[in-house]
Image (cartoon, helix red, strand yellow):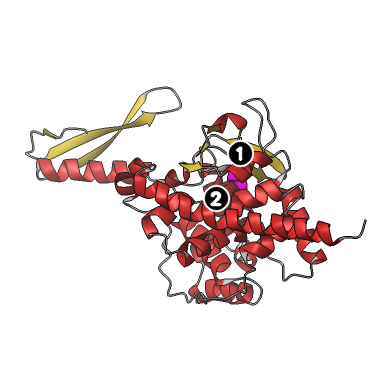
Amino acid sequence: MATAKKLPSGQWRVLLYVGKDDEGKRKYKSFTAPTKKEAEYMAAEYNISEKKPTIPVNMTVGQLIDQYIESKSNILSPTSIQGYRQIRRMRLQPLMDKVATKLLAADVQDAINTDAKRLSPKSIADAYGLFVSALRAQSIRADWRITLPKRQKKFREMPTPETIFQLVHGTDIELPCLLAMWLGLRMSEVRGIKHGDIRNEILTIHSTIVDVDGVAIEKDATKTYDSTRRLRVPQYILNLIAPGPADDHVVQLSGQAIYKRFIRLQEAAEMEPIRFHDLRHLNASVMVALNIPDRYAMERGGWSTNKTLQSVYQHTFSIERQRVDDIVDNYFSAIVQNEMQHEMQHKKKKPR
């Protein structure tokens, strides 16, 4: 910081270096005040104002959001960036060509009301969050009183685990579906498993495969910190895994291929279709029905809490955790055995 010097007149002056002129000579700006403290304060205020980024007068909301996304491209995950770009293209479109510094609360509310006719409350909240973040990143005030659609709890009838097992048993997506329903894995985690990740019947979840703009991208990271976890793999699922090199993926199908096959099986069975990710929700429901303590349910599923690392993760394979694994595995093993017995009895009844 520049220091003020006392002049013969008794005033104090700060000479602040502000660059060079066209001829290469150093330029200074002078700040004079009755006291040393005042002169230095004036210089500091000027320095801060000059360094503060300025927004072009006619910069639009769309341009601001583009700039914000670019600033986060090396920080956020590829899927997050892809989601931001989709919002930029598809949501709050009436705002995108408006000058950011001239926005009115009515403009923002109208855009939200328009999107509310076709989008879920969560989608609108996500879009509004990106919009506000982009403005605030450039110190543009965004303190309007805006009303967002309220989220509403929705109830859906889910099929039983028995129904799902019967649906996928013997198909080429039985393995990925059971990894999701039995072990509670996400699609990205299912696709990321390599043969080397399974040792002594223990699966370590530490990498994922996601699709970004139609391209499969492998990441040496899970969705959240607590999603990196270890799970005991039941013998039935181990038997479904064909041998392979340590670096090869256990599930070779793409995410789209798995999802489309899963939907087709449901349609053929005339079921109310569910998403592949709902199999993970089904796993959570089973653990609730079996009265699995929350701490172990969250550990198996990789759901984050502030106390997970300290109170749960370090005790992953405690005696109590093994008891929990036995309860879940015995439940699903009974489904498998009952279905096998049913198939055997059906074969015996067939005339030769």
| Distance from Cα at disc 1 to Cα at disc 2 | 14 Å
User: Of the numbered discs in the image, which one, if any, rests on residue 313?
Assistant: none
Q: Quadrant of the N terminus?
A: top left
Tell me if I can see residue 209 in this picture: no
Q: Indicate yes or no whether the magenta region holds residue 187.
A: yes
94 lies above or below 222: below
Tell me if I can see residue 301 in this picture: yes
Looking at this view, is 349 or 1 the one in front?
Answer: 349
SS for dot 1: helix
Q: Residue furthest right?
A: 352
- For label 2, the crowd category at 10 Å Cα-Cα, with few meaning under 14, some 14 to 19 and many 20 or more, is many
- Residue located 59% across and 77% down the image: 113
244 lies above or below 146: above
- Residue located 66% across and 47% down the image: 176
SS for dot 2: loop
Q: Indicate yes or no whether the magenta region holds residue 18.
A: no
- The residue carrying mark 1 is 192
- Residue located 59% across and 42% down the image: 235
**Is 235 displayed left or right of 4 in the figure?**
right
Q: Are marks 1 and 2 in contact (CB under 8 Å)?
A: no
- The residue carrying mark 2 is 183
The x and y percentages for residue 92 are 61, 66
